[in-house]
Image (cartoon, rainbow, N blue to C red):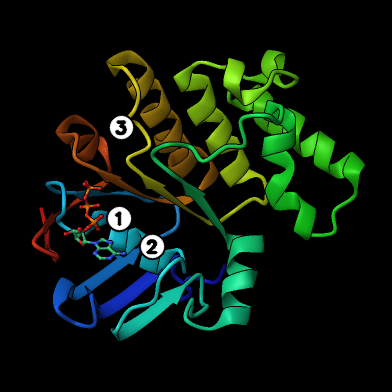
Amino acid sequence: MSETVLPVRATHLAKSYDGGRLPVLHEVSLQVRPGEIVALWGASGSGKSTLLHLLGGLDVPDRGELSVCGLDPRDEAARIELRRRHLGFVFQLHNLIPDLTMEENIAVPALATGVSSAQRTQRIRLLAEQLGLAHRLGHRIQDLSGGERQRTAICRALMNSPRLLLADEPTGSLDEETGSAVFALLKDLAERDGIAVVIATHERRFAEACHRLVRMRNGRLAET
Ligand SMILES: Nc1ncnc2c1ncn2[C@@H]1O[C@H](COP(=O)(O)OP(=O)(O)OP(=O)(O)O)[C@@H](O)[C@H]1O
């Protein structure tokens, strides 16, 4: 990615629900550079998930300018390209398919990209080793611990080598120790692999350990 193409460049984004009756985001501007881990920190209902959804093309802003890895997620073709090649999303409740194995779950994003099954298997093994999951690849999701599930979700999000990882309360369902391990992993991805990471969290200790803490309050950003 050239230096001018930032993973996130959002300017004056606004979003409301309920036909405009429920304004949720106001004048939100945010830039994220490669290798940077940025926390969106704020109380429940402050708009963190809504902003992540806009960045990930899961929802569209009412107003403002948005470029994600040089593409506009409002455009459908760009959205498909983003999901296939540039973007990984980690949800609070992992959203894995419980009946499938860890390996099958991690493989899902690669199914639409046309990579060979040999390349797919190689990539899954590499990621699983990096995240300490190699010994569990054949297990079904329902048989895994919360921390293993969340690390599996991170593997799945990394499957297509994204430049930007969006993580919505990735530690929210985990105990303190497991949550710390998952957070350390996300920070490592930014610092070691140059992936831009945006993490929504209400946990102050994680927000403060990020490179940048952006506070959200009533749908507005205040950088600290
Ligand atoms: N699809 C929707 N339709 C209507 N209102 C919504 C929708 N999504 C979110 N909201 C509302 O927008 C506001 C912001 O929600 P959002 O989920 O972005 O906050 P959050 O900071 O991520 O909260 P939490 O930490 O609880 O996940 C809330 O009042 C929420 O009820």
Q: Position of residue 184 (x, y in %)?
A: 39, 28
Asked if one can make out residue 152 in the rendered structure from this viewpoint, the answer is yes
Between discs 2 and 3, the one toward the N terminus? 2
Q: Quadrant of ligand 1?
A: bottom left
Residue under circle 2? 53
* Label 2 to label 3: alpha-carbon separation: 17 Å
Q: Amino acid under label 3?
A: Gly
Amino acid on which the number 2 mark rests in the picture: His
Q: Are marks 2 and 3 in contact (CB under 8 Å)?
A: no
In this figure, which residue is indicated by the disc labeled 1? 49
Residue 177 placement: quadrant: top left
Q: CA distance from mark 1 to mark 3?
A: 13 Å
Q: Is mark 2 within 8 Å of ligand 1?
A: yes
- Give left or right: position of 196 versus 50: right
Q: Amino acid at mark 1?
A: Ser
Q: Is mark 1 within 8 Å of ligand 1?
A: yes
According to the image, label 3 marks what residue?
A: 172
At horizontal 14% and vertical 79% (from top left) the residue drawn is 21
Front residue (pair 68, 94): 94
| Secondary structure under the numbered disc 3 in the rendered image | loop
